[in-house]
Every structure is written in C-alpha cells, then in structure tokens.
Amino acid sequence: MNETPPAVRLLIADDNAATRAATAALLETGPSPVCIWHAVDGVAAVHLAEQLQPHVVLLDVQMPRLDGIVATQQIKQRWPEIRVIVQTMHSRYQEQALAAGADEFLLKGSAPAQLLAAVFPAS
C-alpha cells in the first residue's frame, strides 16, 4: 500500500494577496502535499510561526509593521529548525537576508522551478 507522505507545512508572508495566492497555487504543484497558511505582515508571520511551527516560512522583505529581514531574524533565533526563504523584487536585500539567517534568498519573478527547489530541497 502506498502511503501519502506527510504534508509540508508552509507559511507564506506577503502583504500582497495576489502574490500570496499565486505562490500558494505554485507550491501546491510541488512534489509533496502541502498545508499552507498566510500572513499579511512580519508580525503575523512571527506569531503564526510560533503557533503553527511550519517547516518552511516564505517571507517578502517589504511588509508593514515588521519587515521580512527582522521577521527572519526573530524566527531563526527562536526556531532555528524552521527553513526561512526570503523572496523579494530587490536583489539589494540578499546580503541582509542571509545575515539575518535566511536559508535561501530568491528574487520574485525567478523561474518557478527555483522556488519549488528551495521549498522542497530533498525532492
């Protein structure tokens, strides 16, 4: 009997609802089942990371209340096992994101395969 692999728990944090929806739709095509939650800003992302303990958090940089760089730092300090991927339109944030503890940095608009490989690295 083939067993379904456990779902990858994902948190997408972006202040743009269309971006969150498009990202979720792409990730649902990945090689593993997913359970996806959404956050509209960095404060919500940190709060949901604490509550839900996702496997992966995908963060935009420019968000209200708490930006993705600071949210990355807070998440990685408290829960280093959570994989954090920072995704933005601006390459100038790469060094800051990685210094804050991000596991991956991706530019929005990158090939979908890059995002899938970052979220599902063992697949």
Image: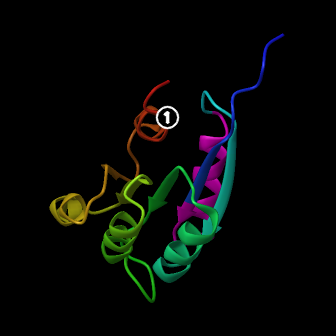
75 or 64: nearer the viewer: 75
Count the numbered circles shown.
1
Is 85 situated left or right of 20 in this image?
A: left
Is 14 situated left or right of 103 in this image?
A: right
Which corner quadrant of the image does residue 18 belong to?
bottom right
Which corner quadrant of the image does residue 99 belong to?
bottom left
Where residue 77 sits in the image (x, y, percent)? 33, 68
Where residue 46 sits in the image (x, y, percent)? 49, 74
Location of the N terminus (image quadrant) = top right
- Judged by its main secondary structure, the magenta piece is helix
Where residue 80 sits in the image (x, y, percent)? 37, 57
| Res 15 seen here | no
Relative to 48, residue 104 above or below? above
Q: Amino acid at mark 1?
A: Phe
Residue appearing at x 41%, y 52% in the figure: 81
Where residue 106 sits in the image (x, y, percent)? 33, 49
The residue most toward the top is 1
Look at the numbered disc 1 and give the secondary structure of its residue: loop
Relative to 101, residue 114 above or below? above
Within the magenta stretch, is there residue 61?
A: no
The residue most toward the bottom is 65
Residue appearing at x 39%, y 53% in the figure: 85
Within the magenta stretch, is there residue 15?
A: yes
Relative to 3, residue 46 above or below? below
Q: Residues within 10 Å of mark 1 (few under 14, many from 20)?
A: some
| Res 7 seen here | yes
Is 109 situated left or right of 14 in this image?
A: left
Per the image, the residue denoted by label 1 is 120
Which residues make up the magenta segment?
12-29
Is 115 situated left or right of 23 in this image?
A: left
Residue appearing at x 76%, y 25% in the figure: 4
